[in-house]
Amino acid sequence: MASTHSRDREFTAFVERSAGALRRYCLLLTGSLPAADDLLQDALLQVYLALPRVDDLDLLEPYARRTITRTHISRWRQWGRREFPTEVVREPEPVDDTTVEDRDEIWRLLQALPPRQRTAIVLRFYEDLTESDIAETMGCSIGTVKSHLSRGLARLRSDLTADDSHSPSHPLPEGQLR
Amino acid sequence: MNRDPLTDLLRTTLSTHADQVPAPDTDDVVDGVLPRGHRVLHRRRAAAGVGVGGVAVALATAGWLTTRGDGTGPTPTIAQSPSTSATSTPTVTERSQAPALTELERWELAQKLPVGRPIHSAWRAERTADWRVRVVLPYWDDPAGSSETPTRDAAGNILVTLPKGTGMVTQIIPTAAGYLVASQSDSFTGGDMDPGATLYLVTRTKAIPLLTGIHGPVAVNPTGERVAAVVIVDERARTFGLVERQLVPLQTHGPAPTPQDDVSLLLWSDEGQWTNSGDNWTFVRGPNGGETIGRKVMKAVQVAPSMVYSVDRQPDGRQCIVVQSGPHDATTLGCGQYVSLLALSNAQAVVTVTDDSDVVSTYLADGYSALESLTVPDAIDPVSLIEAVEEIEVNGAGDTYHVLVPIRHPDDPSRQVFVRWDPVAGTAEQAPLPDGVEQIVG
């Protein structure tokens, strides 16, 4: 059994190393910093309790990501859909040819997606995970991941093209990823 | 390959928002998590000890259910008296420490053990392939005149599926009215409070919810006709309350509990309900639930008095295993940072002691006065398999001679191998899951 003191030290080192990346991931799942911090705290508690079972500390961050993902989905299932306040954050200088309005719009639409679809999209397009790795992280089958991605993208595409007032500056082809 | 503007936009948007998130202050995060983690660890370790009370009560009450079929009703029995002299001198022999195993080595060793009979303990909870939790109860004669036909498996065990949303089972206790099943909710992801934790009375055909928001172990009175539990009164304010329900005849509702800052239920003996407050004072309430009858001792008894073993918390936070060595005498066998006990029978218990250096020793407590070392077999040391498992995750899935210990794969906790461990003989074997069962969850 790991010593409580050594467990605390390992945990602190892990937080120093990984909390920044995990907090970013939590924000993308929840849409707001307060909710992200709540989620991060709860997930890190699970990481702390699991520390003695993890021999390879390199596996800790993937474990934390899995825990965050499943905690987020479970929370939503427990509490139901809630309002997700959008953070007012300083926009950086544009780094590509998309506009701030485009990104604001897609960000708003992302928050409206069901949590499983949003999670799958974040894992695919932010974490760059394969569908197999997403399935592992979310605890579901690859087929389910494909379904979440497909439906999530289709809904985003539909919402974007349906709302002319918020349409992006680059019209999106219908059904490309269906 | 065509680039999809939507996915490009998604990548940019997600990265842009993520880049705006500053790294959290490490001290803030650690300060927020560690106290909660310590509380959970402490509660788990305490629960391992309190669970012995449940086992002891189970041993004392197991006869009821098999005597109901002839219409004679429950026959309350009290756990047997010690079979060994209560005045003999306690002896403690520490066995030699086995080399520490990594999680993976333990997993691999467990899989090399001989395969024994499938798990078919007296009662258990399983997760089925369709992700439902069901309890498996031993053969149970139909009460006279009952028209209810239970669902049974091929072995004749009764199967009762719990409602959707059940995550795992934490306690199964036989009573005069059926089995009490304490469960956690599927949405519970950690922390020390689960508002969805539900206590069911499981009869031969259905699960009747008795209490929700139960917190910690539940206790049944010596006749098996009443149950007490601590429930969450206000989650935000962290207040709790002690409630009772009558099982025979069944009453599913009762008065609201009085909110208290912290209370845990230890056991329900002939003397009344033993509760432990947050400052480790133990109170005994009268059998009728009335006022405290005067016992207010600096002592946290975590096992049934019939087992005689007890766990005392010292002012410095350490715990000591105490046995009764005479009518009015108690003797300390050993102390450590944490101790836990598992009753195998009325005369034997498995004891683990974590010393100040976090070295774990596992003993077999034999009789009421001696604590002896465990036998270590030559080939594979099952003790080292067992003791390295965090908080010796024993549950009620064994029997009175064996302990079932889940060994989990380090990378995938959902993969489990059960080791059936006989601490007396020092042998271990694999206990396969029954056909059609994905996991044992309680």
Image (cartoon, coloured by chain):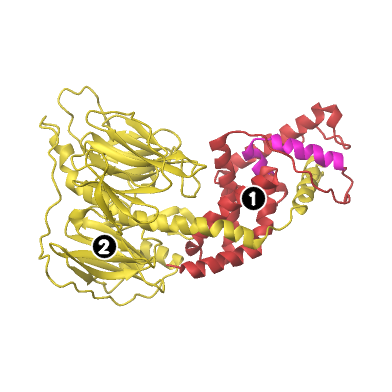
Chain colours: A red, B yellow
Question: Looking at the image, is B7 positioned above or below residue A58?
Answer: above
Location of residue B200 by image quarter:
top left
Q: Do the dots labelled 1 and 2 sit on one chain?
A: no
Q: Residues within 10 Å of mark 2 (few under 14, many from 20)?
A: many
Q: Nearer the viewer, residue A154 or B312?
A: B312
Q: Nearer the viewer, residue B428 or B251?
A: B251
| Residue pointed to by mark 1 | A37
The subunit letter for the residue under badge 2 reads B
Location of residue A161 by image quarter:
top right
Q: Is residue B157 visible?
A: no
Question: Label 2 sits on what residue type?
Answer: Val
The subunit letter for the residue under badge 1 reads A
Instruction: Kindly state the secondary structure of the residue where label 2 is placed.
Output: strand
User: What is the magenta range?
Assistant: A100-121
Q: Is residue A59 magenta?
A: no
Q: Position of residue A169 (x, y in %)?
A: 89, 37
Q: Residue drawn 20% across and 54% down?
A: B305
Decide if residue A132 is on the left or right side of residue B134.
right
Q: Nearer the viewer, residue B225 or B316?
A: B316
Q: Residues within 10 Å of mark 1 (few under 14, many from 20)?
A: some
Question: Looking at the image, is B11 positioned above or below residue A47?
Answer: above
| Residue pointed to by mark 2 | B350
Q: Is residue B227 visible?
A: yes
Give the overall secondary structure of the magenta segment.
helix
Q: Position of residue B326 (x, y in %)?
A: 13, 65
Looking at the rendered structure, which numbered label has been put on residue B319?
Answer: none
Question: Label 1 sits on what residue type?
Answer: Asp
Question: Looking at the image, is A146 positioned above or below residue B106?
Answer: above
Location of residue A113 by image quarter:
top right
